[in-house]
Image: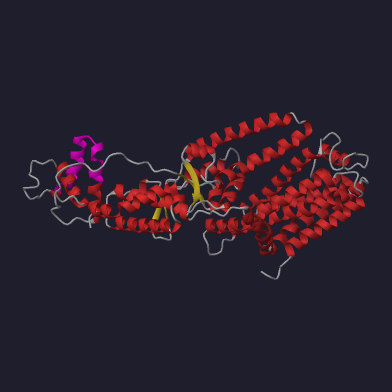
Amino acid sequence: MGGVHPAIDTIVTAETPEGISIPIRPAGFAVRACAFLIDALIRIAILSVCAFLFSLGRRVGVGLYLISAFVINWLYPVLFEMSAGAATPGKRALGLYVLMANGLPITPAGCLIRNLLRAVDMLPLLYAFAIVSILLRRDSRRLGDLAAGTVVAYRHEIERAGGLAGGVPIPPPVVLTKRQELALTAFAWRVDRLTPARAEEIASHAAGLSRFRPERATSDTPMTDRLIGIARWLHGDRQ
Amino acid sequence: MTALDFEASNEAQWLELEKAVSGGEKTLDPERFLFLYRAACEHLALAEARGFPAPLVSRLSRVTARAHQIVYRQSDLGLGRIARTLMQTFPATVRAHRWYVLVAALLVFAPAIAMGYVVAHRPDLILSLADSTTVEEFGRMYDPANPAIGRLRDAGTNWMMFGFYMANNIGIAFQCYVSGIFFGLGSLYYLAYNGALGGAVGGYITSIGFAGTFFPFIATHSAFEITAVVLSGAAGLRIGRSVLLPGRLPRVASLQIAARETSVIVFGSAIMLVIAAAIEAFWSSAPWVSPGAKFSGAAGCWLLVAIFFLRRARAD
């Protein structure tokens, strides 16, 4: 996971009591802005319906409208983020959810604080503080998230199609370091998404691994196939 | 052990856990779920340490992350928890912040008393805080000839005013809390400003001779309203202090602790303000209740609020 290229990924990890680290993929500015717009439209729609219904009630209606406007504006995110999906409809539609930065599910206090501090994030206008904070931070948290210890993240990780490329397993000619093994297996798993010429170009960087026993590979065997063979052997295919 | 052997010998457990996290968790016995979760955690750590292929590691990582969310989920969100928070955690947290509450109260009452005294003797000074139209409206609101005290003649019904008071007051309380993040300056400003404005209005109303309607009007709901604003401001001061003087913690960590600890105060204050708005709309403004009855009710409410926050003070 993140270990190979930590510098160019936005993944943050949270360590659990079980001693594993959970990868969290924070949602950036663009997707959160879209989620916000969806939520804003839903809120406006609900408020319009309320305004219409309560307009039938004259002055009692005005009071009820003020109450509902207050409740919808302040409690809308709180209620949805405390419910089972931990996301407002806008976030849910875009596959986002809110969780604590330590990887735990969102707590009521965290949820309340992040939505209360919306009032600060809105300053000086148009959520400027939130936007600056989200753009500057690797984990894309606004001030409310920082105070509450929460983070908005993608719920699902993208699963890459494809599997280990086929071929004859080849025992590695030298003892490989863990890093080299990782590079080889990563290559063998994604070679089906590369053009053969590009695959061979990448594989040629491992030319040092060219001494093989002849029954497994000859000097004609393309470097790509040799590397796939070593990866298959490492994976456990010893036929 | 190679990745293939590892997969072959443990796959059954992973499949069972994957099935459980994708919705069927209720069908699985909790002990079994926890066992599978811990096993998967161990397998993930092993797979990473042995450099097993990325797809295997990410599969384990996915299923453990989902299971982790389920294992540590807070299932207890019932009414009992909310009641306990309001009835016990809220007053206990307020007591733990008594110095902040004291400072916040001083910040409200000192300007209120000072402005009240000054404006009662020189009514034109109220114009330094509010414009003449607003001031004139205040005057008409507390005119004894007004059929509903504390609002303009054409303002609307009790329900409408309930909605208005609630939104307005909770807005002020939130402002006092949230603006504390600017090194406490926001809380200082809003507490002192609202105190000064309230005092000035009181002084002005007294100077034009409507004190007989004004004080019975504010006496009751202010028990909840002023207390709630002071408490929100106190929480805001705590937030400000956590940013200004984080001690040995990083600023963000200090802010997180302060926000977590004070959030219950803000929650409790919001509930108090809903109560205050209801009293203000349906009781304080009712002209058919005699001032004597209003003052008795007010005494009861202030006593109630005091007991609520001071009871069991020795226990913690």
Residue A158 image offset from top left, x and y in percent? 37, 41
Considering the whole magenta stretch, tell me its main secondary structure.
Answer: helix
Q: In the image, is B102 to the left or to the right of B50?
A: right
The image position of residue A170, as x and y in percent, is 14, 49
Instruction: Give the magenta range.
Output: A186-207
Residue A15 appears in the picture as rendered: no
Q: How many marks?
A: 0
Picture quadrant of residue A197: top left
Q: Is residue B78 left or right of residue A193?
A: right
- Is residue B41 shown above or below A30? below
Residue at 14% of width from left, 52% of height from top?
A: A171
Give the residue displayed 70% in from the left and 46% down from the top. B170
Q: Residue at x 46, y 40 (%)?
A: A95
Residue A101: percent from the left, percent from the top? 48, 52
**Image location of residue B220, percent across then percent down:** 83, 52
Q: Residue B105 in magenta?
A: no
Residue A202 among those drawn in magenta? yes
Residue A141 appears anywhere in the view: yes
Front residue of A235/A188: it is A235
